Image (cartoon, rainbow, N blue to C red):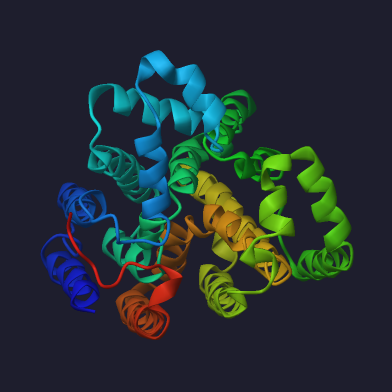
């Protein structure tokens, strides 16, 4: 737990110097200072840190350099984009730390760019990124983290309604994890505004999906047979981590409610300011993505592995939550501190009571 307390304290203390500065340049620097610090722990971790690290390292070690790329693709169960990345790295080195460092750097740089471009409280965004558990994803679901990178960098295309560039970006993302295909429809529903009636409609759709879930999953595994073993034979189909899904539903559901209350109508009522218009677009998008996230988490009660797909949508909370709180004026920092304290208690309890969920403790450098 020393690892956890050390990182939390470092982010908080450094934020007092950089994150609360009025100077935008200083707050931008703070974002990358802290993410660089977090990179050291993610990129140079031991093979024992993270539930999936050993399997990714084993897969990396089984591959050859660029001359054997066709054989690598044939023997690997992973998507072609990820295999190509590993093959390129393997051409120059057999050191798996290089792979972990490159993916970690790409992930954290993308998060930093997203925060600096869209967040109105960068210090709070960094705290949320760590305390909500987004940081710990890089210790486990490496391929999905690459998808998150591509998604965060493609938010610009959704906001500008550039369908061509966004769809191309998401097709690239599918070469790292096929499940990212679920992100493609976002560009077509970007202006779909949620109200009470829409939420009731989403609830009805969720119930309907639960009722036809087994048939739907059989259809999906027919289309993507590489996932058949996960659904039919793995522990994920037997409710092995059901408690994690329940906890995620509660936490994300509460955050969605907080954001809905705090953001208010100002994000929906367009005015003559171009900046506010853009803000309305991406805050509306983030609300929609959070609602989709809750639906996926509810469905994950039927098949636990779906909660990994939900992480694509969880990533936007590092901006959505701070920006919603920022609408409270003089109460922003008070509410922000309360939210941070609650999230700190949440992640601390999870790491202490259920360390097997992430496998990052005890932490050890390579």
The residue closer to the viewer here, 114 or 192, is: 114
Q: Using the image as rendered, state which of residue 239 and residue 299 is in the foreground.
A: 239
Image coords of residue 331 (percent x, y):
35, 79
Residue 263 location (% of width, % of height): 52, 67
* Residue 300 visible in the current orientation: yes
- Residue 257 screen position, x and y as percent: 59, 76
Residue that extends furthest to the left in the rendered view of this protein = 17
Left or right of 21? Residue 294 is: right
Q: Is residue 191 visible?
A: no
**In the image, farthest residue toward the top:** 67
Q: Quadrant of the N terminus?
A: bottom left
Q: Residue at x 54, y 52 (%)?
A: 312
Give the percent coordinates (x, y) of residue 167. 62, 29
Above or below: residue 298 compared with residue 31? below
Point out the image quarter for the C terminus: bottom left
> Who's the residue at 21% across and 77% down the image?
5
Q: Quadrant of residue 201?
A: bottom right
């Amino acid at each position: 737990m020393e690892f956890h307390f050390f990182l939390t304290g470092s982010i908080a203390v450094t934020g007092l110097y950089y994150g609360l500065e009025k100077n935008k340049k200083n707050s931008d620097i703070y974002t990358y200072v802290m993410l660089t610090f977090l990179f050291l722990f993610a990129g140079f971790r031991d093979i024992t840190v993270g539930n999936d690290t050993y399997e990714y390292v084993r897969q990396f070690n089984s591959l050859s350099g660029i001359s054997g790329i066709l054989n690598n693709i044939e023997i690997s169960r992973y998507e072609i984009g990820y295999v190509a990345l590993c093959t390129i790295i393997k051409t120059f080195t057999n050191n798996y730390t290089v792979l972990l460092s490159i993916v970690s750097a790409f992930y954290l740089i993308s998060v930093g760019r997203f925060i600096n471009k869209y967040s109105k409280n960068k210090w709070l965004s960094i705290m949320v990124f760590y305390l909500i558990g987004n940081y710990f994803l890089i210790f486990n679901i490496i391929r999905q983290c690459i998808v998150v990178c591509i998604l965060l960098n493609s938010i610009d295309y959704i906001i500008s309604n550039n369908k061509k560039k966004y769809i191309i970006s998401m097709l690239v993302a599918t070469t790292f994890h096929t499940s990212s295909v679920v992100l493609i429809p976002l560009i077509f529903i970007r202006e779909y505004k949620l109200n009470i009636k829409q939420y009731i409609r989403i609830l009805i759709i969720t119930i309907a999906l639960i009722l036809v879930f087994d048939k739907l999953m059989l259809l999906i595994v027919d289309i993507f047979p590489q996932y058949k073993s996960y659904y039919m034979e793995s522990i994920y189909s037997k409710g092995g981590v059901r408690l994690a899904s329940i906890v995620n539903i509660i936490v994300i559901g509460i955050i969605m409610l907080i954001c809905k209350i705090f953001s208010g109508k100002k994000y929906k009522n367009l005015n003559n300011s171009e900046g506010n218009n853009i803000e309305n677009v991406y805050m509306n998008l983030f609300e929609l993505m959070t609602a989709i996230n809750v639906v996926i988490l509810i469905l994950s009660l039927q098949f636990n592995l779906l909660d990994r797909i939900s992480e694509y949508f969880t990533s936007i909370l590092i901006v959505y939550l701070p920006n919603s709180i920022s609408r409270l004026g003089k109460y922003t920092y008070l509410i922000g501190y309360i939210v941070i304290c609650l999230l700190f208690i949440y992640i601390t309890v999870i790491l202490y009571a259920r360390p097997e969920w992430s496998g990052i403790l005890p932490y050890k450098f390579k």
